[in-house]
Each structure stands twice: as structure tokens, then as C-alpha cells.
Image (cartoon, rainbow, N blue to C red):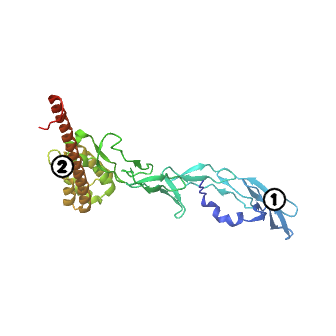
């Protein structure tokens, strides 16, 4: 697990790093050389263990005197420093994972929703996966979110740091007809046999419009113009859009989509083009054309089936009435 230790160790880091190698294991150096203040001779003194500091140096006749670190300070290694190190404080967007003790500084980690980026030596917010991508692995205090493009047959219609891709609705398995095949950013659009004749392309386009704006996300100023041009029930334009941010604009669009007529939805591609969002208008128009083409084909197929069924019924009735062979009227 990632540990971020206070920078207070740095002034004495070279002193602490003096170790000797015993086999493959680094053993602490328990002794140090000191000059006797009386005789001027070199003497070997004991270091102080972690959690203590050197209160009095040794001489030719006395040993080193060590004392415990007072509250709020620590030493992590064998040492001969005259003062314990001050306990560190967790930085911005960090939380204390374990408190400072006499022999260990406090241990910090990033708060929920953030991870530690070594390149910048700070905690950064987990990235979100855009529409059309899902979360492969969620972010942790040590690692950022990992995203992946939704594979065929799946979609993600939101921006999230937690949700993975979802399977497209199987229209056939649900006893419905496929009106628009799903994409990486929207689900499949299905219809019942009754809805094929009672709804138009605007009704089906309505189902993907909220996801469309999340995925294609026009520039904020252009999106404000688009929202301003959306007709209300009394055909008046939307008011008070100048100061709206992206979430508020998307919420305004979703509210409009829920109450707009199918004819108003059908006019949306042209409205986008007039607002300067030519590419978005063309993409939405292509979706609507695909829906209309599929509806035409499904209705035509439905009419053929109905005609065949009617012919069979007609032949059956004639056959029954004549008491024998089939006759065509």
C-alpha cells in the first residue's frame, strides 16, 4: 500500500541511511565513532534505538544516554541525533491512515476519489470514463481509474468512475422489434408490433437524445445556444441559459426531451445545425434516417405477413363453404 511520509526526514536522511550489508539483509549500524571531549581520543559509542534520541554523548568512561521521543516527535532508525523529528502532517487531499508514534511518522493516503501521482507528488482526482467507455478497474488511493472502450454488444451512456459497460437490450428475446441497433454510447431501441404503427421516428429518437448530448458534448457556449433555441410547450424559447454550466444544461435538455412532442424531436437535427453544431446535427439526422428506414422495412414486412394471413383465412373460408377444393375469389 502506498505510504506518503512527511518531508521532515530529509535533513537527516544521510545520517539514517548508514547501514551495513549482512548477506542479503541490511542490518542497522548500532555503533558510531565519537571524539572524547576530555582526552581527544576516538571512542566507539552506542546509537539510540528507534523511538529515542541521543540526550548525552558517550565518553571514554560513560556510555551514550538515550531518551524517549516526546509526544509529537519520532525517530524511525537507530540514530545519534540530539533531537527527535517532528511528526509530519498529511497534505492536501490526504487523510491520516495511521497516527504518528515514537518510532514511526504518521502514514498518509489519498482521500476517497483521489490517487497519489508520484510524478507530481500529490493526490489527484480519479478520472472518469467518458460515454462509450466503461470502468475496467476502479481507482484506489494508489492507482487511477482504468477505462476501456465498450466492446461490441455493450454500451455506456454516462460519464462515470464506477460503472462498466452494459449489455445492449436484446429486442428479439424480449418479443420486440429492433428499431435502432445499439452503439457504444446508447442502448438498442426496440418497439412492439403495436408501437410500430402508433409511433413515428421522433418517438424512438427521443430515447437516445439525452445520451447523444452526453457523448457528443458540444462546446458549452454552443450548447447554451442550443438549449436557448429549444421550443417550449407554448413554442417560446428557453430563458436564462447564459449562466448555466454543463450539468445544468444537460438537465434542461433532459427535461425538454421528456415533454417535447415527437414532431419537435424530429426537428432537433435542424435546430442543432442552425445553432452552429453542424456535425452534431448531421449525426443526429443520420440516426433518425436509420430509424425511419428500419420502421419502413418493419412495417412493410408486417403488412406482407398480414396479407398472407388474410389470404390463408380467405382460402380456408372458401374451402369450407364449397365442401372441398380450394377456390380463389
Is residue 25 shown above or below 258? below
Q: Mark 1 packing: few (<14 Cα in 10 Å), some, or many (20+)?
A: some
Residue 323 visible? The answer is yes
Q: Which residue is mark 2?
A: 264
Q: Single out the residue that lies furthest toward the bottom.
A: 40
Q: Single out the residue that lies furthest toward the front.
A: 324
Residue 238 visible? The answer is no
Q: Position of residue 203 (x, y in %)?
A: 23, 45
Q: Nearer the viewer, residue 237 or 176?
A: 176
Residue sitting at 88 percent across and 61 percent down?
61
Instruction: Name the element at disc 2.
Output: helix
Q: Position of residue 38 (x, y in %)?
A: 85, 67
Q: Nearer the viewer, residue 66 or 216?
A: 216
Residue sitting at 18 percent across and 49 percent down?
264
Q: Which residue is mark 1?
A: 64
Is residue 12 shown above or below 228? below
Is residue 321 shown above or below 137? above
Amino acid at each position: 500500500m502506498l505510504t506518503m511520509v512527511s518531508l521532515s526526514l530529509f535533513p537527516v536522511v544521510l545520517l539514517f541511511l548508514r547501514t551495513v550489508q549482512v548477506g542479503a539483509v541490511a542490518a542497522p549500524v548500532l555503533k558510531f565513532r565519537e571524539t572524547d571531549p576530555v582526552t581527544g581520543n576516538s571512542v566507539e559509542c552506542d546509537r539510540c534505538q528507534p523511538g529515542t534520541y541521543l540526550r548525552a554523548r558517550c565518553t571514554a568512561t560513560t556510555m551514550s544516554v538515550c531518551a524517549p521521543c516526546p509526544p509529537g516527535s519520532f525517530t524511525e532508525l537507530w540514530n545519534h541525533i540530539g533531537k527527535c523529528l517532528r511528526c509530519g502532517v498529511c497534505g492536501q487531499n490526504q487523510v491520516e491512515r495511521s497516527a504518528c508514534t515514537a518510532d514511526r511518522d504518521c502514514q498518509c493516503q489519498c482521500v476517497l476519489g483521489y490517487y497519489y501521482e508520484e510524478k507530481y507528488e500529490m493526490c489527484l482526482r480519479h478520472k472518469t470514463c467518458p460515454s462509450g467507455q466503461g470502468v475496467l478497474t476502479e481507482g484506489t488511493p494508489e492507482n487511477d481509474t482504468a477505462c476501456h472502450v465498450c466492446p461490441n454488444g455493450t454500451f455506456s451512456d454516462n460519464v462515470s468512475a464506477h460503472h462498466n459497460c452494459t449489455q445492449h437490450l436484446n429486442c428479439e428475446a424480449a418479443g420486440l422489434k429492433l428499431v435502432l441497433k445499439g452503439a457504444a454510447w446508447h442502448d438498442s431501441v426496440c418497439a412492439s408490433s403495436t408501437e410500430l404503427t402508433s409511433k413515428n421516428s421522433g418517438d424512438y429518437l427521443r430515447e437516445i437524445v439525452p445520451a447523444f448530448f452526453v457523448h457528443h458534448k458540444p462546446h458549452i457556449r454552443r450548447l447554451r445556444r442550443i438549449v436557448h433555441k429549444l421550443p417550449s410547450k407554448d413554442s417560446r424559447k428557453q430563458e436564462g441559459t447564459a449562466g448555466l454550466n454543463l450539468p445544468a444544461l444537460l438537465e434542461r435538455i433532459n427535461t425538454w426531451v421528456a415533454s417535447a412532442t415527437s414532431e419537435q424531436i424530429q426537428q432537433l437535427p435542424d435546430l442543432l445545425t442552425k445553432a452552429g453544431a453542424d456535425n452534431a446535427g448531421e449525426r443526429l439526422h443520420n440516426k433518425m434516417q436509420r430509424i425511419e428506414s428500419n420502421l419502413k422495412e418493419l412495417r412493410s414486412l408486417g403488412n406482407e405477413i398480414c396479407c398472407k394471413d388474410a389470404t390463408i383465412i380467405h382460402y380456408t373460408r372458401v374451402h369450407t363453404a364449397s365442401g372441398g377444393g380450394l377456390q380463389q375469389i
